[in-house]
Amino acid sequence: MSEIGRLLGSGKEAEVYEHGTLALKLYRPGRPKAPAFREAANLAIAEALGLPVPKIHVTGDYHGRWGLLMERAPETSLADEMMPEPLLSAIEQMAELHRRLHHEPGTGLPSLKSRLSAHIRRAEHLPHVLRDRLLADLAHLPEGDRLCHFDFHPWNILGTTGNLMVIDWLDACSGNPAADVCRTYLLLRRALPSMAEAYVVTYAKVSEITPKKIFAWLPVIAAARLAEGVPEEEEELLHLSALAPANG
């Protein structure tokens, strides 16, 4: 590979750089190769379904860091249209795009419910009694076989109206769309609190899924988030995990 250019974006797991006309996503030093190859495979699945995602060119090692060379996405995000207050039109765009993803099958992707179960078991600060209850609740929540992004938020939607691209597909899975929307709600509660409930209501209007069915997933989604190790969210996540589950 040739030399990388300027930094385009940075997150908890990786950094994205210019690489000629393409983009090079490099996972943090010390990260194993599996995430890079898993994200590449997930992107290939989404691309084959005709979804608006960056096209993968190469997956490999770059000076000791694993990464993906891919089509460069626009540098503006849908979040730019939601500051300081989210516009209804932007929320509606996001909900329609989310529903479009959920229209596709999750064939070839890992199980969403299996991932939630594994994360709940790994969440260190969950009391044992609560953990057991959450695992039982999860077992009774409805199965699903739709494509779920599981990190769907405005900063992962790049571009402008009519030319949007969804990035960061590492966590893509196969499951129930209501769970995927609930995960988005949880992420928005902290990042854009004024938008969180509005997003659920808007998604419900463009789909056949009611807000009640979406919020039925909230305790298990919150408990699974604990395993991701975000200290500033821990108190709120424990509170949400202990809520009585809604009857979806």
Image (cartoon, rainbow, N blue to C red):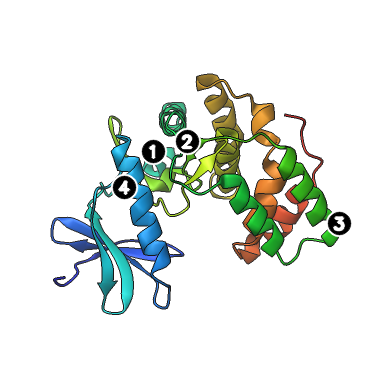
Label 2: which residue? Answer: 86
The disc, 4 or 3, on the residue closer to the chain's N-terminal end is 4
Nearest the viewer among 101 and 146 is 146
Nearest the viewer among 70 and 41 is 41
Residue type for callout 3: Val
Percent x, y for residue 51?
32, 36
Instruction: Decide if residue 33 is on the left or right side of residue 74.
Output: right
Q: Which residue is at 19% across, 67% downward?
A: 5
Q: Quadrant of residue 59?
A: bottom left
The disc, 2 or 1, on the residue closer to the chain's N-terminal end is 1
**Which SS class for mark 3?**
helix
Percent x, y for residue 180?
55, 40
The disc, 2 or 3, on the residue closer to the chain's N-terminal end is 2
**Which SS class for mark 4?**
helix
The disc, 3 or 1, on the residue closer to the chain's N-terminal end is 1
**Which SS class for mark 2?**
loop
Residue 44 numbered tag: 4
Q: Which residue is at 68% across, 42% downward?
A: 218
